Image: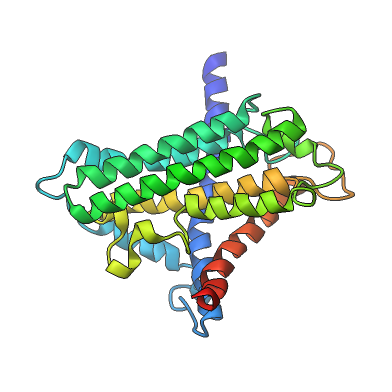
Amino acid sequence: MYYNLLMLLSFIEVLIVIVPLLLSVAFMTIAERKAMGSMQRRLGPNRVGYYGLLQPFADALKLFVKESVIPAHSNKALFLFAPLISLITSLLAWGVVPFGAGLTLSDLSLGILYLLAVGSLGVYGVIFAGWSANSKYAFLGGLRSTAQMVSYEVVMGLVILTVVLLVGSLNLTNIIQAQINVWYIIPLLPLSLMFLISVIAETNRAPFDLPEAESELVAGFFTEHSSVPFVMFFLAEYASIILMSTFVAMLFLGGYLVPFVAFENPTFFSFEGLALGLKTSLILFVYIWVNNTLLPHIS
């Protein structure tokens, strides 16, 4: 009975993390589309719900009721298993993210290594999706995405190693607490910019969106996926973007720390979690700004 209760409590804790995350993915899409619309002098979604806030749920409903088309010559098992790998790995990484002092699902002493390992496993979903579809467009998209993800992980690893050497620990909570006097973005500004660029490339966002081949009117490695498998890839992509933004906030912006403020008896709904969310939102806005403001002037 005691172990059953522990399992139930653990399941509730996981739901407390995953459900808001999936809702954040939904509202991140509408926030991105509205911000892009504002930057490009157009309205963006504004029909479904007040101010277009229900548009993500309308899109999700449309995709769920669509027919799932599986190519006749594809490897059906791997074709359907690939989006599961991508979604599961993007959600597993949240198990070691500290939302406050002592507020984490699993405060591993090797949390950084866990994040890198789980993030590396996401490459298999891309490889399997591109190869199993038996389509040249998906195959080429898979090769390009895999090459880009693996190459920029090297840069990310070297920058993370610098932070680890400063702190002397691989634990994420220790890394955040070490920034109680000064955030690492101040002494490590060049490295933080390198890490942000690597994160943008790792998640295939502009200007590193060549693997998605938008100019070719295809979607890269998941060109042949539709309906629910496509939704899984979509959720995995945006969950990874939010995770990487949170990772940047933890390494260089002090995570859940607020300058000159000390929280007592924190909970999952405390201001510590709100501080981490605001810093993550700032990084997400940088994603959108780079995509829609900086690039036109470069090109």
Identified at 16% across, 39% down, the residue is: 75
Residue 243 on image: x %, y %: 56, 46
Residue 269 on image: x %, y %: 70, 45
Q: Is residue 39 visible?
A: yes
* Nearer-the-camera pick, 70 or 160: 160
Q: Is residue 150 left or right of residue 135?
A: right
Q: For the view shown, which residue lies furthest in the bottom direction?
A: 41
Identified at 26% across, 47% down, the residue is: 130
Identified at 71% across, 27% down, the residue is: 169
Numbered-mark total: 0
Residue 45 on image: x %, y %: 46, 76
Q: Is residue 257 left or right of residue 12?
A: right
Identified at 49% across, 71% down, the residue is: 33
* Nearer-the-camera pick, 244 or 202: 202
In this rendering, the answer to whether 62 lies above or below 233 is: below
Q: For the view shown, which residue lies furthest in the left direction?
A: 72
Q: Is residue 22 visible?
A: no
Q: Is residue 163 left or right of residue 297?
A: right
